[in-house]
Amino acid sequence: MNRKNFLKNSTIATAGLLLPIAVVASGQRTKKKVIVLGAGLAGLTAAWELVQAGHEVIVIEARNRSGGRVLTLREGFTSGLTAEAGAMSFNDNYFNLFRYVKLFNIPYESLKSPAIRSPGGNTVYHLRGKRIVPDNGKINWPYELKPEEREGSITNKYIQPLLDGMHDAAISNSLFDWARSIDNKTLLQLVAENGASAGAQEIIRVTTWYCDRQGKASAAWNLLPVLQSIRSKDVYSFPGGVDSLSTAFTIRLGERIRFNAEVVSIKNASNRVEVIVNRAGKQESIIGDRIVCTIPFSVLQNINITPSLSAFKKEIISGLYYTPTTRVFLEVKKSFWESNGENGSAMTDLPIGQVQKHPMIKTGREGERAILESHARGQDALQLDKMSNDDRLKFTLEQMSKVHPDVSDYYEGGISKSWQLDPYSLGAYSLFLPGQINKWLPEIIRPEGRIHFAGEHTSIYSGSMEGAIESGARAAKEINEI
């Protein structure tokens, strides 16, 4: 099947998931008043594209800021320091994101540039009670492994064969069939069938960025981001903060965005839509022709919609899993790990999860200071949430000392962000269980009456900035072509 016919016949592909952004159509039929729910990247993209196509747009945002799960932290740190509590980076294959970066002339830098990042060094591991530093790239794994698994890379042995023969995820004619073929199993089940020992499975679960820590996601969900990134030449971020991207949209949309407006209910009539919002304790009615709903399903399930959505859509909205994620940020006086030939990052099986250094890109404003983040997911995140803020910082510092023994000597304070405790997120990102991409995703993106759906949870690239932006452009295209 050629690409044209594939895009025409594939349910997911025809939703725009594999298409470049091309929303402003020469054959626009009628000007519409569109209400966009949410000023995250999906909502901002949809709003921008609809405005460019000549429609009247109102963006409703419950928070007092734009960006959604793009969140650059500045408050709580020494002046000049920043940390990313949400999205962090992007690569060459974020084609939709790059369109806006170039359109808005937003500065970005490679994370590989030695002038921008700190000097290179080892990523530390802390597994089964042992602190492990690679020796010339070789890691002495504390697991029972087959003799051949101790030679070379575990991921090269078991993950790469799953991707061989796949083309670039953004243009691959076989993407949907490939994803469908591995959607009904978890990644660990898949590699076990290919001979991976229990120890090798644990290495994949704990030490790879793409495997969900609980090992419960669809293998397709785990590997689609890998397929998207493996042929990328570089990885990038934004000097001064990832919110540079959402801010660029926000400035251009101006007063079309209404902040501190919480959606109370939605009426999806045959000839119009009505959204009731709560602003400063007062309810307001906003009437329009169409809605772009980017509200996470974890939140949307608590909003009254009349008439009721289809039974299948309601089942998905109430059943889609959102990953608990709590990120704790410890400010330190200097990047002390560099003197040990380390880069600050770590992969661990500790309750603090993965360790990452911030800011993503040095600007010079931070001086010698830096931030160490613990990125806890799943049950580990929920356990951290039970603690007070002070106890959470104390616990994280204690655990971090196992990874970076000298951290207490340089610690100056910290803050944390729990996405599942955020009432407008109730989780960090959507996670598809086995079988759900194939069964649920076509239904997730299907409009219901005058309501169109966007957000990272509606994209084949869920959990990413690219997925959010792509989905917003797709929803705008749907409305523009009506």
Image (spheres, rainbow, N blue to C red):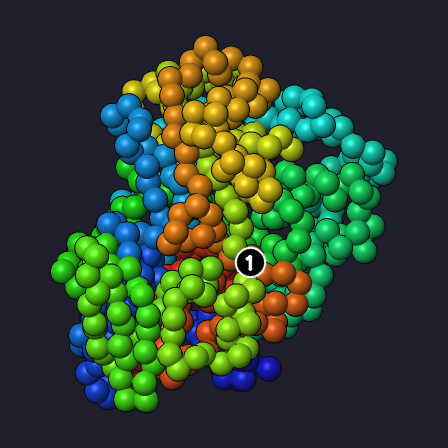
Can you say which quadrant of the picture contains the C terminus?
bottom left
What residue is rendered at 35% in x and 62% in y?
42
Nearer to me, 172 or 60: 60
83 versus 182 height, above or below? above
What residue type is disc 1 on?
Tyr
Nearer to me, 373 or 99: 373
131 versus 478 height, above or below? above
Q: Position of residue 212 (x, y in %)?
A: 61, 48
Which quadrant of the structure image shows residue 21? bottom left
**Furthest residue in direction top, as rendered:** 409
Nearer to me, 266 or 2: 266
58 versus 105 height, above or below? below
Q: Position of residue 157 (x, y in %)?
A: 74, 46
What residue is rendered at 49% in x and 37% in y?
385
Which quadrant of the structure image shows residue 181? bottom right
Q: Is residue 98 visible?
A: no
**Furthest residue in direction front, as rendered:** 281
Drawn side of residue 184 relative to residue 170, left or right: right
Drawn side of residue 458 relative to residue 49, left or right: right
Residue linked to disc 1: 321
What residue is rendered at 36% in x and 48% in y?
70
Q: Position of residue 266 (x, y in %)?
A: 33, 73
Q: Element under label 1?
A: strand
